[in-house]
Amino acid sequence: MRVLLDCDGILSDFHAMYLPVVEKFTGISLTESDVTQFDVLDQIGKKHLQDQVNKHIEWNELCSKIPVLPGAKEALDKLRRFHDVVIVTAPMNTQTWCYERTQWLKREFDIPKSKIVFTHSKYYVGGDVFIDDSLDNCQKWANNQIGRVFLWDRPWNRKRKNMGRIQVIDSWEWVLKELCE
Ligand SMILES: [Mg+2]
């Protein structure tokens, strides 16, 4: 099977990098559980600071410094033994994000660039399973593709509606049991 896997919030701890930057520019300190919307700056009414935040991330090469989420390496090792895993990830709007992310995926997971798709329209990418922490991405994919859709439970995707055939998941154990046994 082809498994389409998101990166931020699934493999990489995006908020561990992003929330300190948000605090630096807004003075607002948030923990992951405070994040109730996918777009953090939008949630706190600071969307006008997005360009500054992005420049800071670019200049400090913060994409390449994002920590790996616990358990992701072991899980991906196993998943890749059973399936064709393709990383489908929406880049932030910085000049170096895609380059840094490609290097990061190679360094941390030994994923070659041939297995990475950068897009903001994930629903164009076909596969048997789609795993993401964005409700919007899951809904669009479910509406445009045939295949199983797993929404990874996170604080920013809990205002759920129109779930259709989207299944909510919250652990690698469950993913591996479902797809590798
Ligand atoms: Mg994500």
Image (spheres, rainbow, N blue to C red):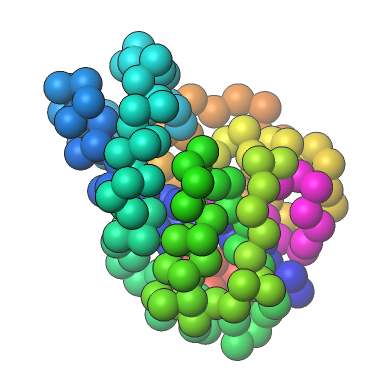
Q: How many marks?
A: 0
Q: Which residues are magenta?
A: 122-133
Question: Looking at the picture, how far across and down is residue 5, in whole percent?
Answer: 59, 61
> Observer-nearest residue: 83 or 86?
86
- Viewer-proximal residue among 166 and 78: 78
- Asked whether the viewer can see residue 32, the reply is yes
In terms of image quadrants, where is residue 155? top left
Q: Is residue 38 above or below residue 179?
A: above
Q: Give how far across and how far down residue 68 sits, in percent.
A: 34, 65
Residue for point 48% across, 42% down: 94
Q: Is residue 90 left or right of residue 28?
A: right
Q: Quadrant of residue 72?
A: bottom left
Q: Judge left or right: residue 4 versus residue 135.
A: right
Q: Residue furthest top?
A: 45
Check residue 88 for magenta coloring.
no
Which residue occupies 50% across, 46% down?
95
Q: Quadrant of the N terminus?
A: bottom right
The residue drawn where x is 43% and y is 51% is 9
167 w.r.t. 26: above or below: below
Residue 3: image location, x then y, percent: 68, 67
